[in-house]
Image (spheres, helix red, strand yellow):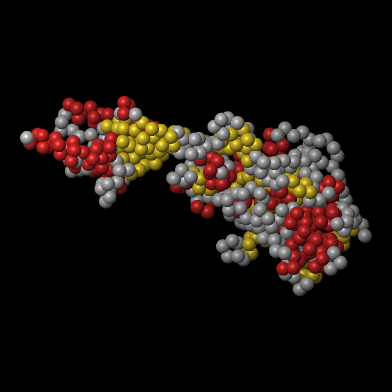
Amino acid sequence: TAFVVRLLQVQAVDAGTYTAKAEQNRYVVHTLPAERGGITDRNGVALASTVDAYDITADPTMFTREQLKIDDGPEQAAALLAPILGEEQKDLVAQLRPENEELRYVRLARRQTPQVWNQIKDLKTALTKKAETDKSVVNVLAGVFADPSSKRVYPGGDLAAAILGWVGADGKGGGGLERQLDKTLAGEDGKIRYAQSGGRQVPTAGSTETPAVPGSDVELTIDRDIQWAAQHAISEQVEKSKADGGYVIVQDTATGEILAMANSPGFDPGDLAHADPDALGNAALQDAFEPGSTAKVLSMAAVLEENAATPMTHITVPNRLKRGDRLFKDDVDHPTWYLTLNGVLAKSSNIGTIMATGELGKTQAEANKVLYSYMRKFGLGGYSGLGFPGETKGILAPPEQWSTSQQYTIPFGQGVSINALQAASIYSTIANGGVRVEPTLVRGTKGDDGRFTPAPEPEKTRVISEKTAKTLARMLESVVDDEEGTGTKARIPGYRVAGKTGTANRVDPATGQYKGYTSSFAGFAPADKPRVTVYCAIQNATEGSYFGGQICGPIYKQVMEFALKTLQVPPTGAAPANLPVTFKP
């Protein structure tokens, strides 16, 4: 009678309760993480990839006294796991004995290597076998499992880190293109539900699965070798100059594709624990700074396009020039210079530039409006089109808001702020015959079906005439080739080089006051048949020279030579322009 009553109780009265308990211990659901797409350079070289890993998990209800028949199950398990996972034993105990007694899932460690999981599996197997022959032994690891996961690796270490960004502990892009293109790269996770016993899947009990959809691969415009050369060059000079930092942009003049975007200091996206938090962004896009004399080419473009002067126009440049309530001067004291407009650019005369841009209108206000319109067409005061996280559009106030001082400093690159890519784009526009091509970083994507989808064509805008662009290219050659020029250190034997130096007073981002200098060099080559633009800037050099021609000119030469060789660009063999710099009064 007792057995019959008990049977009725188990099979009828309490059947639902026992079934629920059985289901609870029997079935588990795991996420099947989607494999994150890789990122490669333009030649298919891996810059970011994904390797197999495991999230080590546990079911806390399997460590209770009811399950293990011992009181210290969590402590014994934590003692075994702590040295393998590199975690504190007390932290693991807290997870295995949570306040919520019904909690069935905890993650003990993320993204562990297959070797770590194999160690744990071997321990579980050994304990299971021992428990079969020795009833005093308890398999305290029966409730430990592994969810297949993945780990992001960056084969180049810090190479192109500012572009790539990183992936956070949650598996999501935390910066750079990893963040911007997270939906494309991430794919869609799947799920699997199966029966288990003693921590093992029961193959005969069946399972249900929703497969994961892998993310797409992304191919960049970056050339890994050119990126390395640019990063190496800027890092060396920043260290040598004891500078706050610096950047180098390398761009294809015809397509707008960015071949390199290097920053110093940098970081290793695979080792964020040791990274400087201030270096985690992409300073080449996020820093806004006054460009200085590299922006004089904008003033010259406006003057030539508006037919206010020609390269041969004579400009008598005094030692000082009074405008408004200020006396303006050049970088060096000098007797009266007798310069052509070409010479004003070659010798980087602030005074000459003010005088030339004053001819853009009948009044200074009209001249300001004309110059502003060209600056906007060249891309200043607007976003590049990359859509990169944290990118600045710089600062370019409307002309009616220019102060008395700005009316005369903006023509030579002070009182206006840009980022490094905007500066490079100015010179690429001139090199491309006056057509601005929106810069690009992504060439296309490849889905799990293997099909390559090219990125949309970049927007193209006519900024200045082809005639003006060619004239400017010839004028920029004088900066490098003429002994009177400020960019002689950027000469490349066998090639015609167009370029411009810049040395601007620098606004300290911490105080908002002028402190130190922004040193820069911008240009393209070959000057008469352009293929590559290189822009370099160094912030706050404190040791040695701070002049752009002296510290950025050599970087330009080093990176440009490497890029021309990598892209197999031959010299044109044509004779240089040799436009006159001075005139006899």
Query: How many callouts does the rendering have?
Result: 0
Residue displayed at 50% across by 35% down: 214
Q: In this view of the protein, which residue sits in the foreground, 339 or 49?
A: 49
- Residue 97 left/right relative to 437: left
- Residue 498 left/right relative to 72: right
Residue 386 position in % (x across, y down) = 64, 47
Q: Quadrant of the C terminus?
A: bottom right
Residue displayed at 51% across by 45% down: 173
Residue 413 position in % (x across, y down) = 73, 59
Residue 357 position in % (x across, y down) = 82, 61
Q: Quadrant of the N terminus?
A: top left
Residue extending furthest toward the left:
1
- Residue 239 left/right relative to 17: right
Query: Residue 75's image quarter?
Result: top left
Q: In this view of the protein, which residue sits in the foreground, 475 or 376?
A: 376
Query: Residue 370's image quarter?
Result: bottom right
Residue displayed at 84% across by 62% down: 360
Q: In this view of the protein, which residue sits in the foreground, 119 or 459?
A: 459
Res 186 visible: yes
Residue extending furthest toward the bottom:
325
Residue displayed at 60% across by 31% down: 451
Residue 297 position in % (x across, y down) = 78, 53
Res 481 visible: no
Q: In this view of the protein, which residue sits in the foreground, 530 or 325?
A: 530
Query: Residue 303's image quarter?
Result: bottom right
Please, is residue 379 above or below residue 455 in the view?
below
